[in-house]
Image (tube, grey):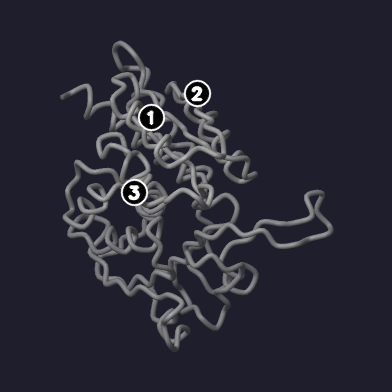
Amino acid sequence: MELIDGNLIAATIIAELKAEVAALPGRKPCIALVRIGDDPASLSYVKKKEKTAAEIGLTSRIILPPVTISQTDLFALLDQLNADPTVDGILVQSPLPKHLSEVAVFRRVSALKDVDGFNTLNLGKVAQEDETGFVACTPAGIMELLARSGVDLKGRHVVVLGRSLIVGKPVALLALQKKAGANATVTVCHSGTTNLPALTRQADVLIAAIGRAEFVTADMVKPGAVIIDVGINRVPDPTKKTGYRLTGDVHFPSVSPLASKITPVPGGVGPMTVALLMKNTLKAYRLQTAS
């Protein structure tokens, strides 16, 4: 079993981006990070994104609207950022307060600055295999992890557990694309799938993004499969100072001996998401400065 080190691969990408940004003339790429509310996970994610941007040499602008902001006022804020020529990328950190529509907010971000890859136009470009669009960061990170770990999906059966807009749907589309590293046969499973273990046992590459702690167990995995664990779940653990431990959607102790390659949690897919966000920001800068 080989452990796929997401921290190491992300660090390599960050070093590549740092060199590219250092060579840019004039102003550096800028990402606006909009965080609404004090969700602890969101706070941690935005801090990590801000720190990584600084490491690469990007400018980050942290915007903290009140948790009571209306949809209309949030749209007005996004319109200002869309029109600001010094802002290249915009990310609205989810989850949002319940009175705000995430889908409507994602659509309001300009497709040219949508470094999160959730705008309708960019999702459509993924389906059309149009390289000018932005790919959602976690699915893009998964594809980078596979490619940089020597996993070619051509002709292989990829099973995706989960059909979310953030991971499941876009990563399935990416694996299907007619390009190097893709060309897979893809099955998407979800809460409505019957006889789920029979399908997951067919997977040459299993991507678990179902949001249920340690859901994938050894009886669901084909020996020799590549396992990509996207889940980040907090499980109560009184031995930890925090009172919890982080675990993925895969039961690592029982599944890892069967896998040919597997990502850990933490330290697998997570660092890649941040690295690909920065890569998208540099792409947005180049698209906008070229226009």
Task: Compare marks 1 and 2 and give the one earlier in the sequence.
Answer: 1
Residue 204 point in image, percent of width and height: 38, 73
Give the distance between the C-alpha atoms of the residues marked 3 and 1, in whole angstroms.
Answer: 22 Å
Give the distance between the C-alpha atoms of the residues marked 2 and 3, in whole angstroms.
Answer: 24 Å
Amino acid identity at mark 3: Phe
Is 181 displayed left or right of 270 in the figure? left
Q: Nearer the viewer, mark 2 or mark 3?
A: 3
Residue sitting at x 40%, y 34%: 278
Task: Compare marks 2 and 3 and give the one earlier in the sequence.
Answer: 2
Furthest toward the top, the residue is 26
Foreground of the two, 106 or 48: 106
Q: Which residue is mark 2?
A: 54
Mark number displayed over residue 118 = 3
Is 50 displayed left or right of 151 in the figure? right
Residue 52 point in image, percent of width and height: 51, 31
Residue 124 point in image, percent of width and height: 21, 53
